[in-house]
Amino acid sequence: MADTIGGGINEDGSLQNTIVIDEAQFSNIDIVGLENADVTELTINAPVSDVELGLKGDQDIAIAGARIVDSVITNEAGSGETASVVIGVTKAKNLTFETSGKGATDLSVPVGKMTKPTISTAKGNATDSITFGSSSTLKSADISTGKGSDTLTFNGRMKGKTTVESGKGNDVIQVNRQNGKGKLILSDFSKKDTLIVGNETFTLDNVDDAPNFIKFDA
Ligand SMILES: [Ca+2]
């Protein structure tokens, strides 16, 4: 039986994020700052699965600790708002990040492994930022960021095949990856987009010179 935590209104009128978790796993998560705080901090004490987080855009969320599997984070923030989430768990497997509202996404994975995530931000003009830090390992991601000028940063180890559909807008894709044999596929790289690899900058004009672990076909 799943329980919903949060979802209320703080004293300042801001909306609380929501957490849906099976009762049997409840003791595996410590939750701090769900009420009347700027950041909701989740500490995963023991692996959890099928957790659902709803981000309202008023409170940031930071997740640390042990493994999370088959979980869903939904950006429910409204237009003009930004849902910020930091995921720094040991391993996040089969994470789905989806966006039901028109709000922007600021997603950061500073450390830990993220395997087979599906990340999709608002289809509208929201400006999204997705960052994988130098101590992270990303494997086989599927990312789409819609319209708006989005920034995607891959500074960690990359494995498998990661596909990015950055949509319309002046998108910037920065790659400073550590070792790893992964491929990065920029399926809709257009003349408005910029690819930065190390200290080299590529546009559609010179994209043939980009390192060959980066592909431009769907
Ligand atoms: Ca875009």
Image: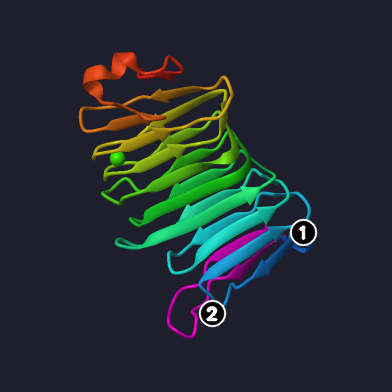
Residue depicted at 39% across the width and 35% down the height: 174
Indicate the amino acid at tag 1.
Asn
| SS state under label 2 | loop
Residue depicted at 25% across the width and 25% down the height: 203
Q: Position of residue 50 (x, y in %)?
A: 66, 49
Q: Position of residue 165 (x, y in %)?
A: 36, 32
| SS state under label 1 | helix
Residue depicted at 32% across the width and 15% down the height: 209
Task: Report which residue position mark 2 lands on.
Answer: 36
Reply yes or no: does residue 42 show up in magenta: no
Ligand 1 location (quadrant): top left
Task: Report which residue position mark 1 lands on.
Answer: 28
Q: Position of residue 14 (x, y in %)?
A: 44, 76
Around disc 1, counting alpha carbons within 10 Å, would you say few (fewer than 14), some (14 to 19), or many (20 or more)?
A: some
Q: Quadrant of residue 31?
A: bottom right
Residue depicted at 45% across the width and 24% down the height: 184
Span of residues in magenta: 1-21
In the displayed structure, 174 sits above or below 63; it is: above
Question: Which comes before the other along the chain, label 1 or label 2?
Answer: 1
Indicate the amino acid at tag 2.
Asn
Q: CA distance from mark 1 to mark 2?
A: 23 Å
In the displayed structure, 203 sits above or below 145; it is: above
